[in-house]
Structures are given as structure tokens and as C-alpha cells.
Image: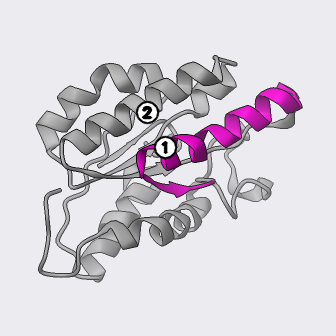
Amino acid sequence: MIYGDSLSSAYGIAQARGWVALLEARLERERLDYNVVNASISGETTSGGLARMQKVLAQHRPAVVVLALGGNDGLRGLPVEAMKSNLSSMIALAHKAGARVLVAGVKLPPNYGPSYTRSFEAAFGQVARKHGATLLAFLLEGVADNDALFQNDRLHPNEAAQPIILDSVWGALRPLLAPAGKRRGA
């Protein structure tokens, strides 16, 4: 289950071209028997994600959760400690439901100030280590520094960026997946 915001919900591009749909195709090619659920909502904050997490976990019963929230918290300048608390609670809920968790971090533009930016970016690793989750330090690795990979808003990756995002996610996600024929949930 992908649990994110607009970076995972294929904002501004066709759903079938987003990295989550590409993930589903890769799982099929690799003969890994998983169903992919994209429970991402554009604009979602960690507070909103936490509010709906139990219901979504109960509905989908995922074996793995890719937790890709926090970017909107940062863009809104919300307190980093609140974001960390929300992420921690979501990881704990996912673990309690039997899911393995991959935390996908994001980075902010430098205009948020060095102190806030450093604290924000470090939060993902701190939370992942604290709860024994796997960390992908930066969801947009290989994308963020290339303007040609963004839509006109310079916030949302375009279609050409989606395979790059998938490759980044795949490197961290693959070790969490059971071998072919040993599927354990969605």
C-alpha cells in the first residue's frame, strides 16, 4: 500500500503513468504476487494521514506500507515535532497491523531556512530508525535537480520522472517483499 500525497497520487499526469502504477507493472514482471493499493491523496499532511490510517489499514490489510507523507507539512511550515509524532504513530499502527514499513523522505527548497530544513529532512531518518522501519532518504532522488522532470509548477514531477522515482523506491522496497510464491498480503 502506497500512503502518500500528490507525489504518489500521479498529480497532473495519467494515473497509469505514475510511479505507483509502474510499480504494479514491475511487480507483475518480477512475478511477485502483490496487489498495489494507492491510498495517496493530493495535499495530504501527516495529520490527515494519521486520521485515516486505521480505517485504510483495516480495509486493505497490507503486507507492506510505503509511507510517503510529510512534504505538505514542510511546505506549510508545520512543526517538525508534530510531523515526527504523526509519522511515528502511523508506523506503529502499520506494524501493529502486521505490515512492514518503508518511510520515504522528502526535502524542502532552501527558502524555509537552514534550521527548519535540516530538522525537517533529518526527521524521516530519525523516525524510521526509532521504529525499525526501512528508510528511503529522498523520494525524488535523481529527479529534484532536473527542471525538465517537473511540471510547470516546479513542485510535481512529470511523466518522464516517474520511472526514476520508481527505481529509487524499488531499491529500498524490494528487500521488504517476500520471494515469488511466498506472498504475505497486499
State the residue at coordinates (24%, 50%).
99
**Which is nearer the N-term, disc 2 or disc 1?**
2
The x, y position of residue 24, in whole percent, is 30, 65
Estimate the spatial distance between the alpha carbons at disc 2 and disc 1, rounded to whole Å.
Answer: 8 Å
The x, y position of residue 159, in whole percent, is 56, 57
Would you say residue 180 sits in the magenta stretch? no
> Residue 174 occupies which quadrant of the picture?
bottom left
Inspect this view and state whether residue 44 appears.
no
Task: Give the answer, above or below, for where 32 lies relative to 153.
Answer: below
Task: Give the answer, above or below, for where 80 lies relative to 59.
Answer: above
> Residue 86 occupies which quadrant of the picture?
top left
Amino acid type indicated by mark 1 = Lys
Q: Nearer the viewer, residue 20 or 32?
A: 32
Amino acid type indicated by mark 2 = Ser
State the residue at coordinates (21%, 55%).
63
How many residues crowd around disc 2 within 10 Å: few (fewer than 14), some, or many (20 or more)?
Answer: many
How many residues crowd around disc 1 within 10 Å: few (fewer than 14), some, or many (20 or more)?
Answer: few
Name the residue carrying label 2: 88
Span colored in magenta: 112-137
Q: Nearer the viewer, residue 61 or 8?
A: 61
The answer to whether 152 appears left or right of 114 in the picture is left
Most distant residue in the front direction: 130
Task: Give the answer, above or below, for where 76 lies relative to 12.
Answer: above
